[in-house]
Image (cartoon, rainbow, N blue to C red):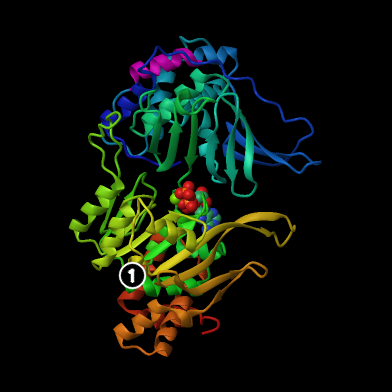
Amino acid sequence: MPKDKLSKKGFRAKLGGIFKRKKIKTLPPPPPKPLPKGYKVVEKYPLYEPFAHAAIAQNPVTGEHKYILDELRLDTLEQSVYDRILEILLAEIANPQEEIEDPRQFFVTEAEKIVGKYRISLGWLPDVSWSKILYHAQRNLVGFGRIDALMRDPNIEDISCDGVEKPVYIWHRRYENLETNMVFHADQELDDSVVKLVHMAGKHVSSAFPIVDASLPGKHRLAVCYRREVTPFGTAFTIRKFRDDPYSIIDLINLGTLSEEMAAYFWTCLENRASLMVLGGTASGKTTFLNAVACLIKPGSKIITIEETAELNLPHENWVSLIARRSYGLGENLTGEVSLFDLVKTSMRHRPDLIVVGEIRGSEAYTLFQALATGHGGMATMHADSIDSAVKRLIQKPMDIAPAYMPLMNIVVSIQRVHLPQSKTGEMTAYRRVISVDEIADYEDYKKLFNWNATDDVHISLLKNSIALNSVTTRRGLSWQKLMEEMKRRENVLRWMRERNIRSYKDVAGVITEYNAKPESFYEREVLAGAPAKNS
Ligand SMILES: Nc1ncnc2c1ncn2[C@@H]1O[C@H](COP(=O)(O)OP(=O)(O)OP(=O)(O)O)[C@@H](O)[C@H]1O
Ligand SMILES: [Mg+2]
């Protein structure tokens, strides 16, 4: 599970905050939902042994899948002991003596001590019951409550609840959109769970401020619409789970999202200060791609990232993360608001080499283009399905960028979630693919650099079209052939990393640093001497 540092004060404040609003009274657990009729379990895997497992059930007739969360439940006696021990834990758990790395582990250790002290006076229960009670206490006090086990499933990308009496849905890496057997049956239960999540994110939600975007411990992105203020079915929430270990460029090549040649192209262009924009639909992988290519940027560069909720995770030392802040005023009185626009504006005063805007939607785009015009590097994502629709939105209000400014954004990457047959079973599975890379020569004049061929699942390159690479040759006094040789070397370095399973974003950044420092000697010493690269 993700670790979050918490100060001494913060730990108790968070524990207390959960129940501050009312007297502790746990709701009776909802009855377990049996396996839907006609469904068969096709896969089962542990989430938190021995307390929680996930099962994927399939209807053999329709082929439809469902996600069954199988969690050990408390019986009536255990539930009553649980209610009492919860009060004792909250009263007795001591402040940590020093800053704690892992609040969950701290809680477990302390809770075990306290349970040891009281277990006899609370009546005899077998060890297994105490383990279950402690599991539920941990889940509800320092975990994510009822969805805690889902948060432990690395296969889940998103968790969403559309309202009360509606099943919670997840996006599963292999089975895609799945209905789960988890339902919030009462408004109170759903509202309390969501208030707890919002408090864990250090934010406030109420009927007056029913819309919240926040970052949960572990950097999971939380979006909430509270009560029936704007959502007639009751509180709705969606969590985009954050990977503790973000996808690196090597992971994305291994997943087939882009080719080695494309990565070498991005590496070369970004090193030469090209600007880049990633386009795609919801959950197409825009932010992930942006994060992965950002690791190709020279390590010493000063990078400023600007986001609404913190999602980017860079290995660079010289990295400043700026997060927008919502106002706590009502109506017109937006006192204290710090918008993306404000942050992009202020970022220029911090002398960045590169400004990365998580997602452009409004007037911040205008300021980003101004930054590009004054020689800063820039990267951003934008929700759009094609370069044409993106450019049309960019030139209209509120972004309002002059068409003549368009070529300041050099490279446009379009990414999509596509369905391809699996080689073994032929079953259609979702993958992310960069479907095209274009360079903007002028307003409505784009040069195609890479194209994805769906039939063979390969990327076709048209590098000769590249304005960015041609300008590198001019600026560095290199012939096209020399530049292509350099790109080939970089491709081989990327393949060398793949062959050696050097994939974590920090390790990849380490190799990029070494290569950038002394390309020739690194290449000869490591890549050529280690394993002669194919096709070189
Ligand atoms: N290339 C990829 N291959 C496999 N999974 C991916 C890939 N890129 C992203 N993902 C997964 O897809 C999910 C969505 O990714 P991401 O947040 O990057 O999408 P997004 O386009 O930025 O979404 P949004 O529009 O909501 O901001 C994440 O769980 C991520 O781990
Ligand atoms: Mg995103």
275 over 34 or under it: above or below? below
318 over 164 or under it: above or below? below
Examine the image and state in which quarter residue 329 appears: top left
The local secondary structure at tag 1 comes to: helix
Reading the image, the residue beneath label 1 is: 513
140 over 446 or under it: above or below? above
Magenta-colored stretch includes residue 84 = yes
Q: Which of 268 and 70 lies nearest the eye of the viewer?
A: 268
| Region rendered in magenta | 82-93
Examine the image and state in which quarter residue 265 appears: bottom left
Q: Which of 148 and 455 lies nearest the eye of the viewer?
A: 455
What is the three-letter code of the residue carrying label 1?
A: Thr
Residue at (38%, 24%) from the top-left corner? 206
Q: Main secondary structure of the magenta part?
A: helix
Say if residue 354 shows up in the picture.
no
Residue at (43%, 77%) from the top-left corner? 490
Q: Position of residue 285 (x, y in %)?
A: 50, 55
Q: Position of residue 434 (x, y in %)?
A: 53, 64
Say if residue 277 shows up in the picture.
yes
